[in-house]
Image: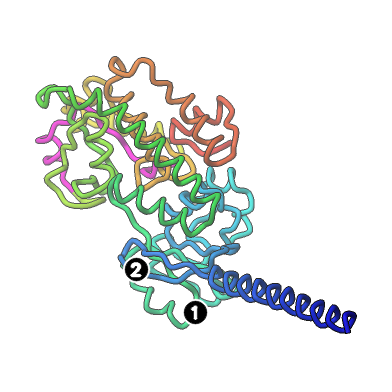
Amino acid sequence: MKKKSALILFSIILGVFALIGCSKQISKTQTSTKSDKITVTDSSGAKVEVPANISRIADAWGAHNAVVTMLGSGDKIVATTLNAELKPWLFKVTPKMNNAVTAFSVDASSINMEELIKTKPDILFIPTGNKNISKMSDLKIPVIQVSFKDFDSLKKCVKLTGDILGEEGKKRAEEYTSYLDKKINMLTSVTSKIPEDQKLKVLHLSDLSPLKVDGKGTIIDSWIQIAGGINVSSDIDGNTKEVSMEQILTWNPDVIIVSSTVGSADRKESINKILKDESWKKTTAVQKGRVYVNPDGVFSWDRYSAEEALQIQWAAKTLYPEKFQSLDISKETKWFYKTFFNYSLSDNEVERILNGQAPQ
C-alpha cells in the first residue's frame, strides 16, 4: 500500500513539473512571438510595425544611408540610391555597399520595383512625403519615412533609426547624440557671445551655374548660426534657391562657402572661378580671400549629413580661427570615423576629406 501511495505521489510530482515546463515553454514562445515585431513612429508621425531584427535594408534617401552606416548597419544595405561614383567615401568605409543594388534615382523620384523586390529587404527607408510611398503598400515591406531639417529633428531621426536597428544601433545613436550636444554646447558657449554687428555674413553656395543658395528652414542655416555666422540668404525659404549676382552683391558676404557638390572633382576649380571673376571680386569675401570649399566625406558634410557634428566644428573654426585655436578638426575627424564608421583615416585621407576631394 505504501509502495502504491509512493508511486502515486511520484506521478503527481512528475505531472506538476511537466506542467511547469510546458507553461514556461508557452510563455517563452509567446514572448518570442511578441518580440518579433516592434512599433515605431517615423518622421511623418506614422506608426509602423517593423521586424525586431533587421538584416536587409533598402534606403531611398542618400543622406540616410550615411546615418545607417554610422549606426553600424551599412553592410546591411542591399538597395540604395547611391553609387561609388557619387559618394566614394561611403563605399570606401563600407565595402559591402558595392554589392547593393541602385534601385532608386538620386532624389528617389523613381524606383525600380523589380530590382527592389529582388533584394528582399526587411525594411525600406524613404524621404518623408515621397510620391512613391503609396506604391509601396503592395510590396508588404515596412516603409519608414525619414527626414530632418535642423539639429533637433536630426537627433530624432538618428534615435528612430537606432531603435529600429537594435541594441548596437541604439547604443551608437545615444553616443552620437551625446557627442553632437557636447560640441554644439562647446561652440555656442563662444559664438553666442559675439555681438550681432561683429558676426560674419556667410553665403553658402549650393550651385554656381545657375547661382543657388540655401535659406532659412534648412540645416545649412542652422549650422551657420551655431558657428556664429549670419546666413545672408536667411530671408529666402528652403534649399537650392536661384538668385542673381546682383542680389549677392547686395548681401556682400564676408565669407563664401562653396558646397562640395558644386562643380568638378577638382574643388580648387570652383574656388578659382569665383576668385578670378570680376563680379565676385566686388565682395568682401573675395577681397579678403575668404572663399572655402566645404568638406565632403561619407556624405556631404553641409547637406543633411551624419557628419553635421563635424560640420559645425569645421565651420566655427573656419569663420573664427582665433576663437577656436585649440580645436583640431583633423583630430576630430579621425576620432569620428574610427568611432562611428569603424574606419581609421590616414593623414592624407583626412586632408582630402577636408578639401572636399574623393579618395585616391
SS state under label 1: loop
The residue carrying pointer 1 sits among few (fewer than 14), some (14 to 19) or many (20 or more) residues within 10 Å by Cα, namely few
The residue carrying pointer 2 sits among few (fewer than 14), some (14 to 19) or many (20 or more) residues within 10 Å by Cα, namely some
How far is the residue under mark 2 from the one under mark 1? 17 Å
- Residue occupying the point 57% across, 63% down: 53
Instruction: Tell me which numbered mark, 2 or 1, is placed earlier along the sequence.
Output: 2
Judge whether 85 appears above or below 57 on screen.
above
Q: For residue 49, what is the image quadrant?
A: bottom left
- Residue occupying the point 78% across, 76% down: 14
Q: Magenta stretch containing residue 168, yes or no?
A: no
The range drawn in magenta is 243-264
Q: Amino acid at mark 1?
A: Lys
Give the percent coordinates (x, y) of residue 42: 36, 63
Q: Residue 150: which disc?
A: none
Query: Mark 1 highlights which residue?
Result: 140
- Residue occupying the point 71% across, 73% down: 21
SS state under label 2: loop
Nearest the viewer among 210 and 317 is 317
Which quarter of the rendered picture does the N terminus lie within? bottom right
Q: Amino acid at mark 2?
A: Asn
Judge whether 254 appears above or below 102 on screen.
above
Image-based side of 250 in relation to 276, left or right: left
Query: Mark 2 highlights which residue?
Result: 130
Q: Nearer the viewer, mark 2 or mark 1?
A: 1
- Residue occupying the point 9% across, 35% down: 250
Give the percent coordinates (x, y) of residue 63: 42, 52
Give the percent coordinates (x, y) of residue 126: 41, 64
In this orientation, does residue 342 appear? yes
